[in-house]
Image (cartoon, helix red, strand yellow):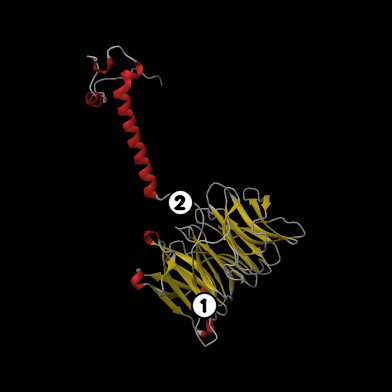
Amino acid sequence: MEGGGSEQQQQGTVTCGSWIRRPENMNWVVFGKSRGKEDSSSVLTIFSFDPKTTCLSSSPLATYVFEAVDGDPVSIAVHPSGDDVVCSTSNGGCKLFELYGPESNAKLLARESAPLQGIGPQKCLAFSVDGSKLATGGLDGHMRILEWPSLSIILDEPKAHNSVRDMDFSLDSEFLASTSTDGSARIWKTEDGVPVTTLTRDSDEKIELCCFSKDGTKPFLFCTVQKGAKALTSVWDISTWKKIGHKRLLKKSAAVMSVSKDGKYLALGSKDGDICVVEVKKMEICHWSKRLHLGTCIATLDFCPTERVVLTTSSEWGAVVTKLNVPADWKEWQIYLLLLGLFLASAVAFYIFFEKSDNFWNFPLGKNQPARPEFGAFIKDSQPSDDRNIWGPVDM
């Protein structure tokens, strides 16, 4: 399917962004914006999201202004609880923020984070799915895995890669996958930071992006692979770390990749502003938005936690919120309504069968035979008394 769903754009020099899941299935969005040409400041801003209109609020709920020595925001990670945000800056390492308050009075409070101060710009930041660990990957190839919220160090590897390009935690938070600008990819145990394996690749292949499956049934690792002039999406089995297949989806080099929170969809964003969304079960494209960022490399691609909506950002065209042209999901109340309808239909069918049963079997006396009980009596007598054993002896 080509063509995008409904879209909303936020102009500005947006360098990174992410969804924030709040209580009662509310969703907010956090953006990092760099300095403009007119001595403006770098900021971290938060907007609310209206799922009915697929729009962000016209004004931010909260804003944090970076100091000049911090530089510009580089990457953002949001804790699964929605209460903490980590932002890497171009000069000052990482800053930690606590998000609190209702929508009418939201606040971003900066916190001290000694283990993350002065570590340089981090290309990648990621929280584990269970929220117990934070991983960082630097432009200098330095990787770290830290316990959360204590920030005690599990892994501190200065030469993990030439330069970290992408990383992702597995659904059970047991593994961390990371890729390098030199085309290699490594797997780490998050419990102790021990390297598990380096993914095998052909001499003409470069592994670029990585995402673990998130549906809980298929233990796969998706990677984008550049094989000569061909851009492929390859799949590894995480029980053996062997490649099991590949497919051409985006058919051009991908700049970013993401998996929906329920694992049903995989999204790829190109270096010239396109996105395609793939149904994981069939590995077929179900949504395509071309020139979403008008020929600019997409920097952020993130699925909304509760809606079929994606957030994309680019430095030239700001942020875009896009509603996907995919089948609507069943809501919880719809499932309960369906079950209630099935129950009522079964009750009506049983009543009709009881009333018409004699005619069906063509009994000679018809439905008014003397020994035939009334429907109400049948209901009343359907429960056996406590002093009767209607089942008889049971063999054990």
Of 81 and 37, nearer the camera is 37
Q: Residue 116, how many percent across, how many down? A: 53, 73
- Which residue is located at x 67 percent, y 64 percent? 253
Which secondary structure, mark 1?
loop
Of 87 and 2, nearer the camera is 2
Q: Amino acid at mark 1?
A: Gly
Q: Quadrant of the rendered structure where residue 165 is? A: bottom right
- Which residue is located at x 73 percent, y 56 percent? 201
Of 50 and 393, nearer the camera is 50
Disc ID at residue 12? 1
Of 374 and 32, nearer the camera is 374
- Which residue is located at x 52 percent, y 49 percent? 216
Quadrant showing the N terminus = bottom right
Give the answer, above or below, for where 219 lies relative to 6: above
Q: Residue furthest top?
A: 364
Quadrant showing the C terminus = top left
- Disc 2: which residue: 329
